[in-house]
Image (cartoon, grey):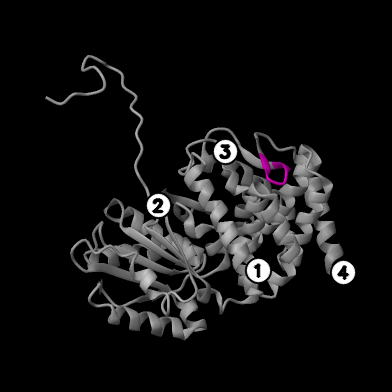
Amino acid sequence: MTSFPWSVAQDALDVSFSVPQTMRLRFTKECFGSDWDDVQSLFHADHQKARVQFWVDRAVVEANPAIGDELQRRLIGSSDRLELTSPVRFVLGGEQIKNQEQSVEEIFRAIDADGLDRRSYVCVIGGGALLDAVGYAAAIAHRGIRLIRFPTTTLAQADSGVGVKNAINAYGKKNWKGTFAVPWAVVNDQSLLSQLSDRDFVAGFSEAVKVSLLKSSGAFRFLCEHATSIARRDWDAVMVAIRSSVLMHLHHITHGGDPFEMQESRPLDFGHWSAHKLEHLTRFRLRHGEAVSIGVAIDTVYSHLVHGLERSDMMATLKVLTELGLPIFDPAVSSDALFDGLEEFRQHLGGRLTVTMLRGVGGCISVHEIDRKAMLQAIEIVQQYSEARTLG
């Protein structure tokens, strides 16, 4: 007879348990070239060929056709290890894929048509929006199919690639439909960043600034000292910044005690209450990374005005964001609807409003109310700084 650690006479049980998870992160320089063996090792065949489906952002291949050619060649050449269940699918990424229900339905249909199961692999090559949409479908189909992400933007490599959130937009709100699921693996490859436009290239470093403000004064100083080099694509500085950012995000997810956001605090969303709203207010004219830059600038100034952040740290933040080539202000910030983002932020997490602010670089706090007058003052200071930099 089975022995239980509790009495059969108990009428009320609260049993805590954990589910083992592994986050596999690989840094490569040519994932479909010289580093292909490292990529192949991520596919566990379980005594048979690993069944694989690939989704690729069409814009990535249009910018660098060699990626598509190399991928097709590698998949055909790996027939003894991998079984490509259908031809590589090329789709248009960007935020629009998260706004269109039919796009996600297409992914579901493809998973079903290929007969994928929980030991199959869905691989996605693209920016954060495509990773989100494909990851959302993979997490729901069969209640979870192994997902391997190949982020192709600095934003996704510095942050969302290792995230455990998969979501699409709904009802005019960012990431309203979604689920938590740990990706099977994430491949941060340098060559996948080579053809990014200047605008998309710098956009990702707003998340690097954000997480360094939260976690590490040393990482923040590095960004301040190398901002112009990063903007010029000095790859040594770029890859240090990306690696540092993603490792801080990864450590928070795996060791922060709340990977699925069951508690009221959500520190990695510093600056995001306004950023998510700004994306919708501008009808996604602003990239996510650009909106985050604006949100981080505003909340950093607010942290100085209300929570004692040193003025020098506030000024250093505004300077590093602008030297990276990121915007810190947009006319949409002046909309009264911006403050609706606070309530949407609260609803998204549940419970009382909880927003992360700064007492110092590397020291964050949770606050439960926002002084609207002080926030408007913060916005005004950011606008004045932005205009002065533009005129200068």
The answer to whether residue 29 is left or right of residue 20 is: right
User: Distance between the Cα atoms at labels 1 and 2?
Assistant: 29 Å
Q: Which residue is mark 3?
A: 265
Q: Is residue 297 magenta?
A: no
Q: Which residues are magenta?
A: 358-364
Quadrant including the C terminus: bottom right
The residue at 18%/66% (across/down) is 48
Three-letter amino acid code at the position of disc 4: Leu
User: Distance between the Cα atoms at labels 4 and 1?
Assistant: 28 Å
Quadrant including the N terminus: top left
- Of badges 4 and 1, the one in the foreground is 1
Q: Name the mark on residue 182.
A: 2
The residue at 26%/54% (across/down) is 142
- Of badges 3 and 4, the one in the foreground is 3
**Badge 4 or badge 2: first in the primary sequence:** 2
The answer to whether 198 is drawn above or below residue 118 in the figure is below
User: Distance between the Cα atoms at labels 4 and 2?
Assistant: 46 Å
The answer to whether 183 is drawn above or below residue 29 in the figure is above
Q: Which residue is mark 1?
A: 237
**Badge 1 or badge 2: first in the primary sequence:** 2
User: Distance between the Cα atoms at labels 3 and 4?
Assistant: 39 Å
Three-letter amino acid code at the position of disc 3: Ser
Q: Which residue is mark 4?
A: 391
The answer to whether 176 is drawn above or below residue 28 in the figure is above
The answer to whether residue 222 is left or right of residue 380 is: left
